[in-house]
Amino acid sequence: MAITEERGDGMTAELPSLAERVSLREQVANALRAAMISGQLEPGVVYSAPALAGTFGVSATPVREAMLDLAKEGLVEVVRNKGFRVTELSESDLDQFTEIRALIEIPIVAGLARTAPREQLEALRPTAEAIVVAARARDLIAYVEADQAFHLGLLALSGNRHLVDVVSDLRNRSRLYGLPSLADAGTLSGSAEEHLELLDKLVAGDAEAVERLMRAHLTHVRSSWAEGGGGGGAVEVGGVGD
């Protein structure tokens, strides 16, 4: 069941309800991430822990703890004596994220076309299909969760868990901005289907085609960021470079 948060400008936004998770702190953190993904918690806006706690029906302590966890991920900033501000991204941030990801992901994923067992690649197909289903249903939370699972699962086939951690951090810092506007523009489903195209090229062992797809769509991701929200609100969406 959704809950309502009153913002400083007098407007309200419905936040997602807490799901069953390992701990209350993790429940709150996941719910806050979901609210950021959906745009219900907005970049640049300061939110207080007590106010959010009231909407969740919990004490302020797990909310503060969750916000501090999100601060370590770069998703929010601590504002002394006020609360937490959802992090905004600059054009320079977006360019740097794209550059780092291109350096890491293009050669690693292209290499998987030569080294990854076909059965391990095919095991990712249901997740790729789930991205498409979520995009068509405009379920942004399910979309991001499936997209994250697909790409990190793909990179995990490299056997380098530290690489997966680095990319996970980059994705967490960039994936929360502008997604609703891109869904509204009707571009989400087409991008989602490109995950299946990438998987088909990997299964076929076509490393050159995989590299071309990755390079083209990382460029497309950066363009989508700019179109989705300009210099402080753009997002990476589910092209194969995502």
Image: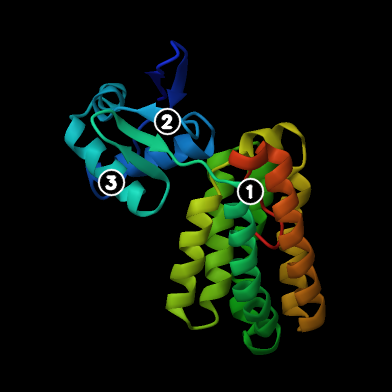
Q: What residue did someone put label 1 on?
A: 91
User: Is 106 on the left-hand or right-hand side of 123?
Assistant: right
Q: What residue did someone put label 3 on?
A: 68
Amino acid type assigned to the residue bearing label 2 in the image: Pro
Label 2: state its secondary structure. loop
Residue 206 seen in the current view: no
Residue at the limit of the structure toward the bottom, as seen here: 115
User: Is 62 on the left-hand or right-hand side of 199?
Assistant: left
Q: How is the image coloured?
A: rainbow
Amino acid type assigned to the residue bearing label 1 in the image: Glu
Residue 237 versus residue 44 in the image, above or below: below
Q: Residue visible at 35% across and 39% down?
A: 19
Residue 119 seen in the current view: yes
Q: CA distance from mark 1 to mark 2?
A: 29 Å
Crowd rating for badge 2 (residues with CA inside 10 Å; few <14, some 14–19, many 20+): many
Mark 1 or mark 2, which has the lower sequence index? 2
Q: Residue visible at 67% across and 39% down?
A: 230
Amino acid type assigned to the residue bearing label 3 in the image: Leu
Q: CA distance from mark 1 to mark 3?
A: 25 Å
Looking at the rendered image, the quarter that the C terminus falls into is bottom right
Rendering quarter of residue 110: bottom right
Label 3: state its secondary structure. helix
Q: CA distance from mark 2 to mark 3?
A: 19 Å
Residue at the limit of the structure toward the top, as seen here: 10
Q: Position of residue 179 (x, y in %)?
A: 62, 40
Q: What residue did someone put label 2 on?
A: 16
The label nearer to you, 1 versus 2, is: 1
Q: Which mark is residue 239?
A: none
Q: Position of residue 163 (x, y in %)?
A: 48, 75
132 or 36, nearer to the observer: 36
Rendering quarter of residue 32: top left
